Image: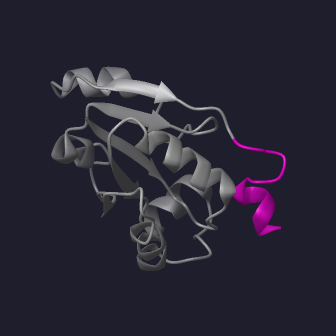
Amino acid sequence: MKVLVFGTFDIFHKGHEYFLSEAAKHGSLNVVVARDLTTYEVKGRFPKNDQLNRVSVLKGLSYVDEVHLGNEGDKYKIIEEINPNIICLGYDQNSFTEGLNEELKKRGLNVEIKTFDGFQTDIFKSSKLRE
């Protein structure tokens, strides 16, 4: 099984670790890291750590099989390229997820979507850790 997750993963913390390790239990884990410009477009600010730094951190994790940078144009194209069996979403993930099922079907992809609960979200949330 090929598993796909995507996110910014800016200030890597135990919540990210929990999410990724849980996703990895479902198959070979592919992580798509949001580009700096995409992060700015979605969140209104650039990440604290640049995209290459964030990729490097994720590549160092034993349970991550592949790390990819997101597509600058068509944000869903990378899903077509990876062609996962499962997409795992975080509890608070809403960028590019609304209408995801419909978009996948339109592209001829049959992908199961799983949403995970967060891990100690009162402590481990990037927006709280940025403060």
- Of residues 73 and 131, the one nearer the viewer is 131
**Is residue 99 visible to us here?**
no
- Of residues 107 and 129, the one nearer the viewer is 129
Instruction: Give the residue at x 62% y 60%.
Output: 44
Instruction: Give the residue at x 38% y 35%.
Output: 26
Give the colour scheme of this rendering. Answer: one colour
Q: In the rendered view, does 16 fall on the left or right side of 99?
A: right
For the stretch drawn in magenta, what is the main secondary structure?
loop
The total of numbered circles placed on residues is 0
In the image, residue 128 lies in the stretch drawn in magenta: yes
- Of residues 17 and 43, the one nearer the viewer is 17
The part of the image, by quadrant, that contains residue 48 is bottom right
Residue 123: image location, x then y, percent: 82, 53
Residue 50 lies, with reference to residue 87, above or below; the image says below
**Is residue 31 visible to us here?**
yes
Looking at the rendered image, the quarter that the N terminus falls into is top left
In the image, residue 79 lies in the stretch drawn in magenta: no
Q: In the rendered view, does 85 fall on the left or right side of 93?
A: left
Residue 33: image location, x then y, percent: 42, 60
Residue 101 lies, with reference to residue 56, above or below; the image says above
Q: In the rendered view, does 4 fall on the left or right side of 53?
A: left
Residue 46: image location, x then y, percent: 58, 70
Start and end of the magenta stretch?
A: 119-131
Instruction: Give the residue at x 17% y 47%.
Output: 81
The part of the image, by quadrant, that contains residue 31 is bottom left
Looking at the rendered image, the quarter that the C terminus falls into is bottom right
Instruction: Give the residue at x 58% y 66%.
Output: 10
